[in-house]
């Protein structure tokens, strides 16, 4: 099975691209969705122990947790040491299941793929990208987004230019859904004959 890593900065259209792979019949593991599930399950008591008062009703209060950790590098690190192993565990189960079902390709949708070394677990990496003005416009369509919040998120992420440099494939989402879907299909055709390189 060929494992594709999918990443891209905030507002680049990564989620829409992941959906296109799913529509082509490719199993997709969404790291963000896994975190959401974990915040309502096994991560809750661990996060409450580390950050008292950030959970309620058996789940993590994402707003309270964000207020506690945003802009605090040590707190973010502490949170990541709790969450990352649980997400990895979810990812490993997903890959075993996809292989068991005979999938030729599987996608790992990981926002901080390069930043966390996740690219080493992939045979090729796709970066979803768009010009910065398009990105900015999309991000500010989201409710509750501020320049400060946007800057804090970007500060945690590798620059788009650096991601593109490291990518095996780039999907440009600025030209609309049909163009992006054509790029997704082209990538699937190309990986069918590419060698695997996972470490």
Image (cartoon, helix red, strand yellow):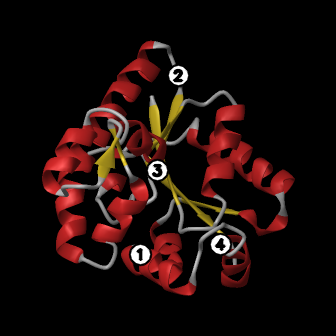
**Relative to 102, residue 90 above or below:** below
Q: Which mark is residue 158?
A: 1
Marks 3 and 1, how far apart at CA: 18 Å
Mark 2 near mark 4, Cβ–Cβ under 8 Å? no
Which residue carries the number 4 mark?
Answer: 139
- Residue closest to the far top: 101
| For marks 3 and 4 on the same chain, the one whose residue lies earlier in the sequence | 3
Q: Residue 146's spot in the image, x, y percent? A: 57, 81
Query: Residue 116's quadrant in the figure?
Result: bottom left
- SS of the residue under disc 2: loop
Q: Residue 155's spot in the image, x, y percent? A: 40, 81
Which residue carries the number 3 mark?
Answer: 124
Observer-nearest of 125 and 155: 155
Mark 3 near mark 1, Cβ–Cβ under 8 Å? no
Mark 2 near mark 3, Cβ–Cβ under 8 Å? no
Figure quadrant of the N terminus: top left
Q: Residue 26's spot in the image, x, y percent? A: 60, 31
- SS of the residue under disc 1: loop
Marks 4 and 1, how far apart at CA: 17 Å
In this rendering, which labeled residue sits more in front, label 3 or label 1?
Answer: 1
Marks 2 and 3, how far apart at CA: 16 Å
Question: Residue at 64% across / 66% down in the picture?
Answer: 12
Task: Count neighbours of disc 1 (C-alpha within 10 A) and say few if under 14, some if 14 to 19, many if 20 or more.
Answer: some
């Amino acid at each position: 099975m060929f494992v594709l890593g999918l990443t891209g900065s905030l507002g680049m259209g990564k989620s829409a691209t992941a959906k296109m792979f799913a529509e082509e019949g490719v199993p997709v593991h969404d790291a963000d969705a896994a975190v959401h599930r974990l915040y309502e399950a096994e991560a809750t008591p661990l996060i409450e122990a580390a950050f008292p008062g950030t959970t309620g009703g058996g789940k993590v209060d994402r707003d309270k947790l964000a207020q506690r950790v945003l802009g605090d590098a040590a707190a973010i690190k502490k949170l990541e040491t709790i969450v990352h192993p649980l997400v990895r565990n979810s990812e490993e189960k997903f890959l075993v299941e996809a292989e068991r079902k005979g999938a030729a390709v599987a996608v790992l949708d990981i926002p901080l793929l390069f930043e966390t070394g996740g690219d080493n677990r992939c045979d090729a990496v796709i970066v979803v990208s768009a010009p910065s003005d398009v990105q900015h416009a999309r991000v500010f369509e989201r409710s509750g987004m501020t320049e400060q919040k946007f800057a804090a998120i970007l500060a945690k992420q590798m620059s788009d230019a650096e991601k593109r440099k490291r990518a095996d494939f780039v999907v440009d989402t600025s030209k609309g859904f049909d163009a992006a879907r054509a790029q997704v299909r082209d990538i699937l055709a190309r990986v069918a004959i590419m060698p695997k390189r996972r470490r």
